[in-house]
C-alpha cells in the first residue's frame, strides 16, 4: 500500500470516529442517574410582558410525588399583596386540592443550604376547576419588603412529560386594590 492510500484510510477512520463519538457519549451518559440534567426553556411568544419567576421541585419524574416551590422573591413584589391568583395549565393532570396547597416564608436553597419553609402563612384557598385557577387569600397582606415567599404545591406529577406554565396574578394592598401580573413559572417534567 502506498503512503498516500494509508493516509487517506487513516483520515477516513478519523472522520468515522468523530462522527460516532457523540452517539457513544450520549448512550453512556443516558444511563448515568447522577448526571446533572440541563434543560432549555423556549418561550414561543417572547414579549416584554412576560416575566420569568424562579421555582424549585423535588422530582421531575412523571407520575412521581412532588413538592413544587413557586417563589415570590422580594424583587418580584413591588407592593404588598392581598390576594394571589394562580392559573394552572390545562394539561396539568394531577389533582390540585386545597389541603395540598400552602403559602410560606421560604429560604431559597443554593449551594450550601436546602430550600425549605421557614414559617407557614395562614391562608384561605378557593379552587376554580372550571377556569383552572387557584385564589389564595393570606389572613394578613404579604409585605413588599419582607423576604421571600413561596406557594407550595404537593402534587403527583402528570403522566405526560413536557413544559407546564403557571401564571400568577396579585392584588395589591392599599386604598384601591389593583390586580396585576406577577410573572410565570415554566416547570419541566421529564418525558422519559
Image (cartoon, rainbow, N blue to C red):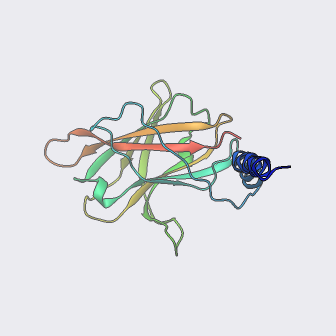
Looking at the picture, does residue 187 appear above or below residue 130? below
Q: Residue furthest front?
A: 2
Q: Residue furthest right?
A: 1
Please tell me which residue is depicted at 35% across the width and 58% down the height of the picture. 73
Is residue 142 visible to the viewer in this orientation of the structure?
A: no
In the rendered structure, the answer to whether residue 62 lies left or right of residue 48 reads right
In the rendered structure, the answer to whether residue 47 lies left or right of residue 17 reads left
Looking at the picture, does residue 26 appear above or below residue 88? below
Report x, y in % for residue 186: 47, 42
Please tell me which residue is depicted at 70% across the width and 47% down the height of the picture. 15
Task: Name the quadrant containing residue 136.
Answer: top left
Please tell me which residue is depicted at 39% across the width and 42% down the height of the picture. 184
Q: Residue furthest left?
A: 175
In the rendered structure, the answer to whether residue 7 lies left or right of residue 72 reads right
Please tell me which residue is depicted at 28% across the width and 37% down the height of the picture. 49
Most foreground residue, 48 or 171: 48
Task: Name the quadrant containing residue 104.
Answer: bottom left
Most foreground residue, 35 or 27: 27
Most foreground residue, 165 or 10: 10
In the rendered structure, the answer to whether residue 172 lies left or right of residue 133 reads left
Is residue 183 visible to the viewer in this orientation of the structure?
A: yes
Report x, y in % for residue 11: 72, 49
Picture quarter with the C terminus: top right
Task: Name the quadrant containing residue 177.
Answer: top left
Report x, y in % for residue 1: 86, 49
Q: Residue furthest bottom?
A: 112
Most foreground residue, 122 or 62: 62
Q: How many numbered discs?
A: 0
Amino acid at each position: 500500500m502506498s503512503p498516500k492510500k494509508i493516509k487517506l484510510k487513516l483520515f477516513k477512520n478519523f472522520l468515522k470516529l468523530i462522527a460516532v463519538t457523540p452517539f457513544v457519549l450520549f448512550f453512556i451518559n443516558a444511563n448515568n442517574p447522577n448526571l446533572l440534567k440541563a434543560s432549555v426553556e423556549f418561550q414561543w411568544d417572547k414579549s416584554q410582558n412576560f416575566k420569568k419567576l424562579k421555582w424549585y421541585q423535588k422530582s421531575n419524574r412523571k407520575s412521581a410525588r412532588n413538592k413544587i416551590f413557586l417563589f415570590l422573591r422580594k424583587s418580584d413584589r413591588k407592593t404588598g399583596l392581598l390576594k394571589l391568583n394562580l392559573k394552572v395549565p390545562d394539561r396539568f393532570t394531577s389533582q390540585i386540592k386545597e389541603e395540598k396547597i400552602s403559602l410560606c416564608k421560604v429560604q431559597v436553597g443554593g449551594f450550601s443550604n436546602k430550600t425549605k419553609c421557614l414559617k407557614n402563612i395562614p391562608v384561605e384557598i378557593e379552587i376554580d376547576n372550571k377556569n383552572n385557577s387557584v385564589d389564595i387569600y393570606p389572613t394578613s397582606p404579604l409585605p413588599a419588603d419582607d423576604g421571600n415567599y413561596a406557594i407550595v404545591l404537593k402534587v403527583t406529577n402528570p403522566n405526560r412529560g413536557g413544559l407546564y406554565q403557571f401564571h400568577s396574578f396579585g392584588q395589591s394592598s392599599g386604598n384601591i386594590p389593583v390586580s396585576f401580573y406577577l410573572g410565570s413559572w415554566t416547570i419541566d417534567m421529564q418525558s422519559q
